Image (cartoon, coloured by chain):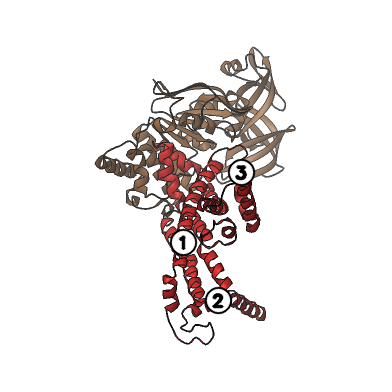
Chain colours: A red, B brown
Amino acid sequence: MMGWGVIRLWTILVYIFMFLPVAVVVLLSFNANQFGSFPVTGLSFRWFVELAENEAIIRAFKTSLLLGVLTAFISTTLGVLASLALVRYKVPGGNFISTLLIAPILVPEVVLAVALLLFLNFLSVHKSFFMLLMGHVIFTLPFVVLVVQARLIGIRRDVEEAAMSLGATPVQTFFQITLPLLAPAVFAGMLFSFTISFDDITGTLFWKPGGVETVPTQIFAMLRNSISPEINALGSVMIFFTVGVPLLGAAIARRLGNHQGR
Amino acid sequence: MSAVKLHNIVKKFGAFTAVHPMSLDIPERSFVTLLGPSGCGKTTTLRMVAGLLDPTEGDILVAGRQINDVPIHKRNLGIVFQNYALFPHKTVADNVAFGLKHRNIPKEERNRRVAEALELVQLPHLANSYPKQLSGGQQQRIALARAIVIEPDVLLLDEPLSALDANLREDMRVELKRIQEQIGITTIFVTHDQSEALAMSDILVVMSNGRVEQVGAPKEIYSNPTSRFVADFLGTSNILEAEITSEGGQSGLTAAAVGFVPLRDEQMAKLAGRAKAYLVIRAEKIDILPLDAGPDARLSFEGTIEAVDYQGQLVRYFVDVQGMKFQVLNMLSGTTSFEDGDRVSVRFDSQDCVAVGED
């Protein structure tokens, strides 16, 4: 019994160590005082208001949102198609392609970032928003492929065969049977891509063209000058997004998957 | 006219031949079973008829029309899969309606036919349930309803009972046969379970290693197998290597332990031109009697019980007769029972013996 007590205490300490800084940031973002110090001297939304009036941040926010949404859309489409090909058809070198698609997770991001940058230089392609987007697609694709493949393997082939035997063409079968059954995984893949893209900084720092800032790179730039309470507010907004969106997504996915037993 | 006709169909997977040239005529409204051990090519054959596999050679005709190049969704066949394959995201009613929607049946008629189909499988109250809320037996009935509601030319059943519990399986067997007879649909049934095959079929097709071993009515195949494989696969048989001989103008087979057994001419005719001959005696055609039992018209041998295997109302004896091991299935009678080591009289009628040849 004694042993369990110690483990429980240790677990609580680990959680405190992990989440206390986050809590502090959120708390300080509501602090009325200019200087982030305890005790908090008053509750205020002034930093959020200043944030909303800071054009650089609004621009970065819009960039991040657009980048995240496009990344999610492209990654998910490619990921679903790739998974279908790899799971449902005999593709020559399928294992190799599968490994290749997953590889960006295994390679340290900074290595991937530098490699892509050097490659673009080698091709003398200029950095652009499109290249940044492609970069994000490359390292979010593995998550989509992994999630969708796992789900697809669980969808029995005979369900699709049954649909076809009843008169559905292969395309109708995909849209009426396979895709609805795949929906939770597609949705999860989309959310993964969006959140990963939304808070990525390493790759983005290397790939972003001059003058384009995403929220993480904007925070990074602001930190270099001074620690402004606005950053706390921005941090809170980021936390709200990167925690809130997946939670919302999980709730929707659960609804979608509600009637799917097997 | 036959409902389904297979003409010399062959299926090869690379260098492996799964189905050797196979021809089969399936009459209208009949229940045909493809029976054999796993890997015998029965499922491959069914999948070729279904359109899920392309035959390497040969023709498949349904209602006189060659359908080799017709894709599965245009074949108008009802398929019931081993694992039901219901659409988990659709209600029972939507599952059953799926095929009708793809045939552009108007809504009112569709609803009526779905209701009728659910009535037929006796599950009308489950229309709004989802598959995962149903038991295995119920799911299989819904799968059957979904397959027959489209009024298919042929119903294909791919081991539909093997995922069910033993008790349920027997109920479903009766149910399936009742429905098939009621709507009079030509049915091809694939199974490895011989009791299912014997109980349900009008025509039984026994397959082994991608070849048809024997085609016929279940009773005929059971009582008169034409190959060693069929004799061995169906029921429990004692198969003895034998020589063709004759005694006093009567021809028959001579085998170790039993000596000369006279056989009817039609049995001897089966051996014409074959390299080897076997004498087949069904385990249930042999009787075990006490040594002191009075003689009767049957052949009689002395043997020793080596093992006894009680199976409820039946008992299986393993008997040694002059070094040959025999299996015997007898009804368990209250008065006589034998134990290991008992000396007994082993009797059978030569009329019950069958000859099979082998090349």
Residue lying at the far top of the rendered structure: B249
Which is more foreground, mark 3 or mark 1? 3
Q: Are marks 2 and 1 on the same chain?
A: yes
Q: Mark 2 falls on what kind of element? A: loop
> In percent of the image, x 52 and y 24: which residue is there?
B215
The residue singled out by tag 3 in the image is A97
Q: Mark 1 falls on what kind of element? A: helix
Horizontal relation, residue B13 to residue B179: left or right: right
Which is more foreground, mark 2 or mark 3? 2
Tell me how far mark 3 sits from mark 1, CA to CA: 29 Å
Is B312 placed above or below A191 here?
A: above
Q: Residues within 10 Å of mark 3 (few under 14, many from 20)?
A: some
Can the viewer see residue B332 in this picture?
no
Three-letter amino acid code at the position of disc 2: Ile
Question: Chain letter of disc 3?
Answer: A
The residue singled out by tag 2 in the image is A227
Tell me how far mark 2 sits from mark 3, CA to CA: 45 Å
The residue singled out by tag 1 in the image is A250
Q: N-terminal of the two: label 2 or label 1?
A: 2
Relative to the observer, which residue lies in front, A252 or B36? A252
Where residue B137 appears, as percent x and y from the top left, is 44, 48
> In percent of the image, x 54 and y 75: which residue is there?
A22
Q: N-terminal of the two: label 2 or label 3?
A: 3
Q: Are marks 3 and 1 on the same chain?
A: yes
Q: N-terminal of the two: label 3 or label 1?
A: 3
Three-letter amino acid code at the position of disc 1: Ala
Q: Residues within 10 Å of mark 2 (few under 14, many from 20)?
A: few
Quarter holding the N terminus of chain A is: bottom right
> In percent of the image, x 68 and y 16: which residue is there?
B245
Question: Chain letter of disc 1?
Answer: A
